[in-house]
Image (spheres, rainbow, N blue to C red):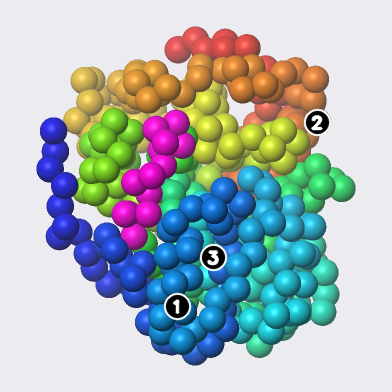
C-alpha cells in the first residue's frame, strides 16, 4: 500500500494561477479578496450543495466578512435554462464574482454564469464557432474562482463551457479566453468522499483527455509531454484512488493528472468526445463514463494512424509489450478492474438514435482532432459496436 503524503502542495501559474494541495480550501476567502470579490456566488450542483464541504466553504468566507450566495439548480449536463436561472439569481442578488465549485457540470455552469453576468446577447451567440467570442463584452465577465471536487474534466483550467442546447439536442461549446478562472483551488481532500464508481468514471475521463490529446495529429510536443505524464500518473494511482478513497497521495496525483489532461487537450480531442457529447446531451448520461466505455472502440478505429504513438506510450507506461496491443490490453484490464461496463447498452443507451448521434458527432468540434477522419456512416458503425459490445482487436 502506498503511503499518503502531505508534501504535494504548490502554487503554480500554468496555465492559470493554481493553488494545489490538501486543505487549500481553507484559503477560499483569501482568493476572494485577491480578486476583490465582496459578495460572490458559489455555483454547485444539487447533491454537493447538501454536503458539509459546501457549508464549510461558505463558512470560511463568512468568517472573513465575505457573504456568499449559493446557486445549485444545475443538471448533470447543464443546459441553457440552468444558465439563465443562474444569471437571474446572480443579478438579483447583486453578486460580484463566481466560485465554481464541484465536478465538470458545476464548473462549466459557473463559468458560463460568470461570462453571461454582464452580457446583453443570448448565451448561444457565444458558441465557439468563427469569431463569435469577439462579440462578448469582456468587461461584463465576472471574476471566477474554480474549486474542482472530482478528478476528471479539468474544466478548472479551461476557457470554455459545454452547455446543452435542449431545443437542438446537442452540447455547444461556449468560449471566451477570460472564462479561464483567475484562481483555481485544487484541494484533493475534497475528492475523498467520492464513491468508487464516480472516482473510476472521472478518472477514465482524465485518461480520455490525455489519450485523445496524445493521439491527435496536430504538432504540439508540449501537449504530448504533458499527456504522457498524465497517463503515467493515472496508471499508477487510479486504482489506488478507487480502492483507498482516503489516500491523499492517490487523490492528489489523480487531481493533477486531470488538470494535465485538460491542459493537453488544447492540442485536440477526437471521436470519444465527438460521440460522448451528443450521447450525453440526449440521454443525460455521465460524460466520463461514456468516454470510458467508448475508449477501446475508438482506439480500434484509429489503429492505422496511431500504431507508432502507441508503441511510444507502451514503453513510457512500462507495459507488458511495446505496441498497440499492449496499450489496448492495459485499457481493457483497467476498465474491468474498476468496474467500467463493456458496452453502452449496460447504461441504457440503445440503437434508436444512432444515426442522429452519428450526425451530431460528425459536426462536433472534437471530431476534427480524430487521427482518422470518420464519415457519418463510420460513426454509426462505431456507435453500434459500442452499444452491442462488438469489440474485436
Q: Is residue 148 visible?
A: no
**Relative vertical location of residue 183 with respect to residue 23 in this rendering, above or below:** below
- Residue at (62, 12) in percent of width and height: 388
Frontmost of labels 2 and 1 is: 1
Element class at badge 1: helix
171 within the magenta span: no
Element class at badge 2: helix
- Contact check, label 3 and label 2, Cβ < 8 Å: no
**Depth check, front residue: 352 or 329:** 352
Category of crowding for the residue at label 3, using alpha-carbon neighbours closer than 10 angstroms: few (below 14), some (14–19), many (at least 20) = many
**Relative vertical location of residue 338 with respect to residue 85 in this rendering, above or below:** above
Q: Is residue 192 visible?
A: yes
Closer to the chain start, of discs 2 and 1, is 1
**Depth check, front residue: 186 or 216:** 186
Q: Which mark is residue 100?
A: 3
Element class at badge 3: strand
x and y percent of residue 133 in the render? Answer: 69, 72
x and y percent of residue 130 in the render? Answer: 73, 65
Q: How many marks?
A: 3
Residue 42 image-quadrant placement: bottom right
x and y percent of residue 393 in the render? Answer: 45, 12
x and y percent of residue 1 in the render? Answer: 13, 33
Q: Which residues are magenta?
A: 187-200
- Residue at (63, 45) in percent of width and height: 76
Q: Is residue 322 left or right of residue 218?
A: left
Frontmost of labels 3 and 2 is: 3
Closer to the chain start, of discs 3 and 1, is 1
Q: According to the image, label 2 marks what residue?
A: 356
Q: Which mark is residue 61?
A: 1
Q: What separation in Å lies between label 3 and label 2 (alpha carbons)?
A: 32 Å
Amino acid at each position: 500500500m502506498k503511503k499518503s503524503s502531505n508534501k504535494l502542495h504548490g502554487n503554480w501559474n500554468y496555465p492559470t494561477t493554481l493553488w494545489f494541495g490538501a486543505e487549500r480550501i481553507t484559503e477560499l476567502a483569501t482568493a476572494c479578496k485577491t480578486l476583490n470579490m465582496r459578495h460572490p456566488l458559489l455555483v454547485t450542483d444539487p447533491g454537493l450543495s447538501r454536503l458539509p464541504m459546501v457549508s464549510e466553504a461558505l463558512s470560511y468566507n463568512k468568517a472573513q466578512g465575505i457573504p456568499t450566495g449559493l446557486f445549485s439548480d444545475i443538471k448533470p449536463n447543464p443546459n441553457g435554462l440552468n444558465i439563465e436561472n443562474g444569471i437571474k439569481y446572480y443579478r438579483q442578488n447583486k453578486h460580484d464574482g463566481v466560485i465554481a465549485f464541484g465536478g465538470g457540470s458545476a464548473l462549466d455552469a459557473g463559468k458560463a454564469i460568470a461570462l453571461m453576468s454582464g452580457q446583453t446577447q443570448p448565451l448561444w451567440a457565444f458558441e465557439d464557432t468563427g469569431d463569435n467570442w469577439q462579440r462578448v463584452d469582456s468587461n461584463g465577465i465576472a471574476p471566477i474562482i474554480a474549486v474542482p471536487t472530482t478528478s476528471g474534466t479539468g474544466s478548472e483550467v479551461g476557457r470554455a463551457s459545454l452547455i446543452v442546447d435542449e431545443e437542438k439536442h446537442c452540447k455547444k461549446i461556449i468560449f471566451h479566453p477570460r472564462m479561464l478562472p483567475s484562481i483555481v483551488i485544487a484541494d484533493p481532500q475534497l475528492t475523498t468522499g467520492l464513491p468508487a464508481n464516480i472516482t473510476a468514471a472521472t478518472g477514465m475521463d482524465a485518461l480520455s483527455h490525455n489519450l485523445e490529446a496524445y493521439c491527435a495529429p496536430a504538432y504540439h510536443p508540449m501537449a504530448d509531454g504533458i499527456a504522457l505524464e498524465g497517463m503515467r500518473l493515472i496508471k499508477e494511482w487510479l486504482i489506488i484512488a478507487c480502492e483507498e478513497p482516503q489516500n491523499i497521495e492517490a487523490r492528489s496525483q489523480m487531481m493533477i493528472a486531470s488538470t494535465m489532461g485538460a491542459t493537453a487537450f488544447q492540442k485536440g480531442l477526437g471521436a470519444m468526445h465527438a460521440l460522448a457529447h451528443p450521447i450525453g446531451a440526449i440521454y443525460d448520461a455521465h460524460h466520463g463514463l461514456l468516454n470510458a466505455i467508448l475508449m477501446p472502440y475508438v482506439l480500434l478505429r484509429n489503429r492505422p494512424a496511431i500504431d507508432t504513438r502507441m508503441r511510444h506510450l507502451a514503453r513510457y507506461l512500462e507495459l507488458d509489450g511495446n505496441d498497440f496491443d499492449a496499450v489496448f490490453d492495459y485499457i481493457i484490464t483497467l476498465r474491468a478492474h474498476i468496474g467500467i461496463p463493456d458496452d453502452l447498452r449496460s447504461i441504457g443507451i440503445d440503437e434508436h438514435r444512432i444515426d442522429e448521434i452519428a450526425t451530431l458527432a460528425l459536426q462536433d468540434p472534437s471530431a476534427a482532432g480524430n487521427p482518422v477522419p470518420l464519415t457519418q456512416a463510420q460513426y454509426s458503425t462505431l456507435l453500434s459496436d459500442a452499444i452491442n459490445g462488438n469489440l474485436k482487436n
